[in-house]
Amino acid sequence: MANNARSSKGQEPCLRVIPLGGLHEIGKNTCVFEYGDDLMLVDAGLAFPSDGMHGVNVVLPDTSFLRENQKRIRGMIVTHGHEDHIGGIAHHLKHFNIPVIYGPRLALSMLTGKMDEAGVRDRTTLQTVGPRDVVKVGQHFSVEFIRNTHSMADSFTLAISTPVGTVIFTGDFKFDHTPVDGENFDMARLAHHGEKGVLCLFSDSTNSEVPGFCPPERSVFPNLDRHIANAEGRVIVTTFASSIHRVSMILELALKNGRKVGLLGRSMLNVIAKARELGYMRAPDELFVPIKQINDVPDRETLLLMTGSQGEPLAALSRISRGEHPQVRVKTTDTIIFSASPIPGNTISVVNTIDKLMMLGAKVVYGKGEGIHVSGHGFQEDQKLMLALTRPKFFVPVHGEHRMLVQHSKTGHSMGVPVDNTLIIDNGDVVELTPDSLRKGNAVKAGIELLDQSRNGIVDARVLKERQQLAEDGVVTILAAISTDGAMVAPPRVNLRGVVTTADARKMSLWTEREVTWVLENRWKQLCRNTGEKAPEVDWMGVQREVEVGLGRRMRRELQVEPLILCLVQPAPGGTPVYKGRADAEPDDRPAPRGRGGRGGGSPYGRRNGGGGTPAPVRTNQGNGNGRSGSPTPAPVRAAAATATAVVEKVTPQPVVEKAAAAVQQPVEAEMPAGRTRRRRSAAS
């Protein structure tokens, strides 16, 4: 695999940087550095599912490239402990080993719990690092950890030394000159590398469209203090559990205002426990009250701190807004503070949660104008300062949606980086770096992996499409009775759930019967194989699939709907009496497939529809008056009855006329003994 160190346009050795997530999106930040036989990972995060991902709990990057090259993985670097940077590691360890993971103490402490829960603690070694520590990964990478400031404590920027030069990988950052924990951004070390020469800068682009400097975290303190002090009843605060600095300030304000704190949400409990254990957060034990005892504390002395700032359906605040939480109910005297801004894609969920809380009578404080939230990602002036300190030869904006990457690249140009030395990339693109060149190489496979709520089951593209079809167009189920002779022995049963259609029950029944018959006429020889035994070997799954595809195509064409279609075949032994089909069936003008051994062209009903037959019944939710499921007599049938009465009445005694009319108007589905074919004498005869 040594040729991987060569550029795609020649034999010149090069460094390859391959983002598998975090580009043209927010979240699941995952990047691979490759030189020679060495692969090094930087972060491995997750993302939140979009509205169309029904039943999906976690979105991860496709790691096919890493699985195929797992023997070359030398280690992983973690920049900080946010879920969009470490949330996928425990899952990935189920599929490939990582020899060692280097990262800050808080991030690795949180990661340990995730790995224990997933049962993969023995699949790697965790190594804690501090500011300016240097670690060796493989033969070709040396990584220095440079302290930065972010919305989470213990966060780092990376200076990666490689055979082609030094690469600065910023991770998430902003320049906060008054950090809550007193840990200042190590700007001197960035300037040191800029002075020595930085080959390429890979920089966070999240807020590249926002002018100015990002406000410091401490700026929200007086506004939170005002709202908490003025609250007449309980105070409920929701924020990101991983925002250690924000949570620390809220606990400090609770102590200042004489309020006891109740914690709700698993992640909030875990993060606060880890942060207090490691010394990143200081709060006395008597400040906290178990949530089961919180109702014993006067409202004026209560503060509830919880998850749910993004409107997650199962988070504590979302359950409270729906009245589903076992311990907490909203009161009209409550003041609820959203100390967070919605992640792109979560806005609707957040707004709906706010509306529900307001409908319950609570006072809700939210929005930029309240000054109760600041971002952890630098604005344009922060990004300019990063470019000025590092003075890179080449520049690649990362971590952001496409418009953010474009704007960040323009900021780079304004800071003196030539246009030709800037590259905008997508997940799976390969950045090839040499001392004198920056170019895009041959892409690797990239995409997404969807996990259900267990975080074990993969929701593949087929399952996701089926769920979307169920949600958008409903489901059609078909039960077809077919003998091993290749004959339909009973009318197919059709059931519609959630399908909005203008087609009546009779037409749906007819379409289904036509599809089943066409498959038996034109596909049976390919789906049935005689093995010399008493009964032939039939590919019943193939029969079901053919019927599903045919009926789905017709419904798309005729009705412009695309429901999920499920066909179940009930096999019958050979020699079972054949169901004759409809006499009034529409002609099927589809030609038989050439060279496929079909039973002849033209209508598949040519040899089976010689006599009158019972229309295939459609199962609906409407009763027919006798306690059975069925359909009312269609209008065309009633018209035929009236015509027959008028013609026969002239030459036939009245009792005979009435009997003929009744024969035509009887219900579509006649009740027959089990195991027998449904038949009815034609009215014309």
Image: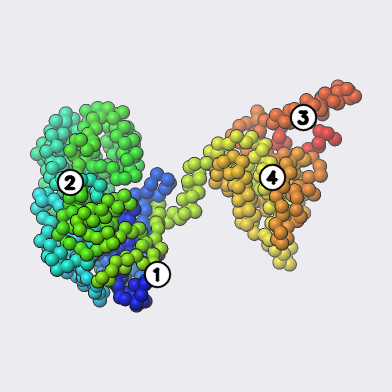
Task: Find the distance from the CA under tag 4 to the CA under tag 3.
Answer: 22 Å
The three-letter code of the residue at mark 2 reads Gly
Q: Nearer the viewer, residue 597 or 418?
A: 418
Q: Are marks 1 and 3 in contact (CB under 8 Å)?
A: no
Ranked by sequence position, the earlier of labels 2 and 3 is 2
Which type of secondary structure does the marked residue at label 2 adopt? loop
Residue visible at 44% across and 54% down in the picture? 459
Given the current orientation, which residue lies at the most extreme right position? 651
Quadrant hosting residue 626: top right
Task: Find the distance from the CA under tag 2 to the CA under tag 3.
Answer: 79 Å
Quadrant hosting residue 537: bottom right
Looking at the figure, which quarter contains the N terminus? bottom left
> Where 450 falls versus 640 (above or below)?
below
Can see residue 255? yes
Ranked by sequence position, the earlier of labels 2 and 1 is 1
State the residue position of label 1. Answer: 68
State the residue position of label 3. Answer: 640
State the residue position of label 2. Answer: 212
Comparing marks 4 and 1, which lies closer to the viewer?
1
